[in-house]
Image (spheres, rainbow, N blue to C red):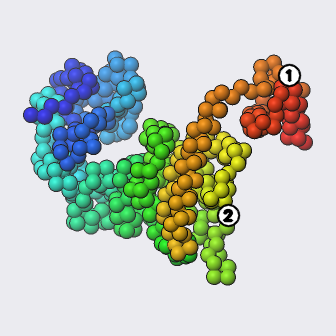
Amino acid sequence: MIEFKHELFTTLANKLGSYFVYLVGGSVRDYLSQYNSNYTKFKNKKVQDFDLVVFGCADLESEIRNIANEQNLPFIVLDAENQIYRIVNNEKKWQADFCGPRGKNIEEDLGKRDFIINAIAYDLAQKKIIDPLNGQKDLEKKILQAISLDNLKADSLRVLRAFRLKAKFGLNIEPETCIMLSEAFVLIDSIAIERISAEIWGLLESENCFDSLKEFRDLGFFEKIFPEFLPQKEVPSNDFHHLPLWEHTFELINQYENFVKPQLPKQCLNFIENNQINYISWEAIIKMSCLLHDIAKPRTWEIIKGKHTFYNHDNLGAEMALELGKRMHWPKAVTQSLSVLVKYHLRPFHIAPIGSEPTEKAERRFFRKLGDNFYPLIALAWADLLSTRGAAISDEMIKNSELRLLNLCTNYEEFKKQEIKYEPLLAGEDLKQAIELSKLPPSKLIKDILKELQDLQLDNEIKTKEQAFNWFINRSQKYSN
């Protein structure tokens, strides 16, 4: 007998013991994957996201609110009409969603869910699995099968979820289910854009999402959600790109997952795997930047004397990334990073001619401009490099360009060590006096001027406190004018 264990379950047994409480959906599926030899990568992963159905409770909101208050945890009403409530434990990084029953019993409730692998429940009191549709068999065979078309149409976001699950678990979508997905997808406009974005990010953060994303694209779903990409279909291959632009855009994710990540320096990979922005992983952000990096090429496309040109597509693309992020309601910090990555995706190869070394000054300013976006940019640039294999690109050019990326990573580590040791020449009372004399009001402008001063100090162009003081005053006057 498989027993699911978590501190939450003990609490629920004590507080909701008089009701029928079932763990359902993805949380059960994720527990089962830990015991299945077909899903070895999930063996040591903790299940931290729980869905529970409570039968027999007349006032579920009060019961769950009381549990949250007693545990000093946040309580969130997700959907009062349908009795859906959430408790979040930020310290231990788990959350639990509670809802009332969708049917007269757990079997009927499971029958109203999306996919058969998600129609499995675990009885917390009796510690047994309830699997009326044989979802464990589908999980074992790695098959994703919809329960019914009506269930998909009831919430067409489930169409996107199909591709996220395919990517996460390496599933094959059953042919009849593919037909159902297409029929249900026509209702996607009724879904809130925030929910759509959440599923897209979930798809991209999977370690191997390329096949799922490609199937999603080939069914026509991608362009429906992102019509901004449609003009890419008009741009053909050329001397530098062996693929048409539409194919090239998606090929970057294939190259990133299968060829770039295995070659990334350890410090670069560690940053990507262990950091995030607003709960969105850098893995997902990098893949989105792969999709966005050439979004402006159709607008900048010209053929001059038989040569395809895309002048300024990087800068225009950065602006388009901001517009797209706003439309999709992405977190502002995520959208800004995407804009930076798009803007500078060619910069590692243009900072100096390939085959020569960039100056230390140019490198340092490049590093400071990128900040935390540096390692993700290396990953994006590398994926773009390997996806650009037209007749004009030689193996030697690829090899030298890869060497440039590796050297930049090495030099970036040295740069960070210097940054840690940095002691500003203008600080404390001297800085206070300089600000007063400059008559600058408290603003971001002061921070920008100090950043310029830091650059000059690290470049050894300003060496004394007096020089720093005078430079600050002069620079402030130029800003004021």
Q: Position of residue 217 (x, y in %)?
A: 40, 65
Residue 312: give its label.
2
Tell me what residue is drawn at x 49 percent, y 54 percent.
Answer: 288
Quadrant occupied by the N terminus: top left
The residue tagged with tag 1: helix, strand or loop? helix
Amino acid under label 2? Asn
Residue 116: % across, % down: 19, 51
In the displayed structure, 300 sits above or below 62; it is below
Image point (52%, 62%), residue name: 398
Q: Seen in the image, is 336 located left or right of residue 459?
A: left
Nearer to us in this view, 54 or 171 = 171
Tell me the quarter of the picture where residue 465 sits: top right
Residue at the spot x=56%, y=58% of the render?
A: 401
Residue 478 image point, x, y percent = 88, 41
Q: Quadrant of residue 258?
A: bottom left
List the residue tagged with mark 1: 433
Whether residue 237 is situated above or below residue 369 in the rendered picture: below
Q: Evaluate whether residue 176 shows in this view.
A: yes
Left of 104 or right of it: where is 75? right
Q: Callout 2 environment at 10 Å: few (<14), some (14 to 19), or many (20+)?
A: some
The percent position of residue 405, horizontal first and vertical second, equals 56, 52
Q: Quadrant of the C terminus?
A: top right
Name the one closer to the observer, 78 or 81.
78
Splitting the image into 4 quarters, where does residue 315 fall?
bottom right
Residue 326 can be seen, yes or no:
no
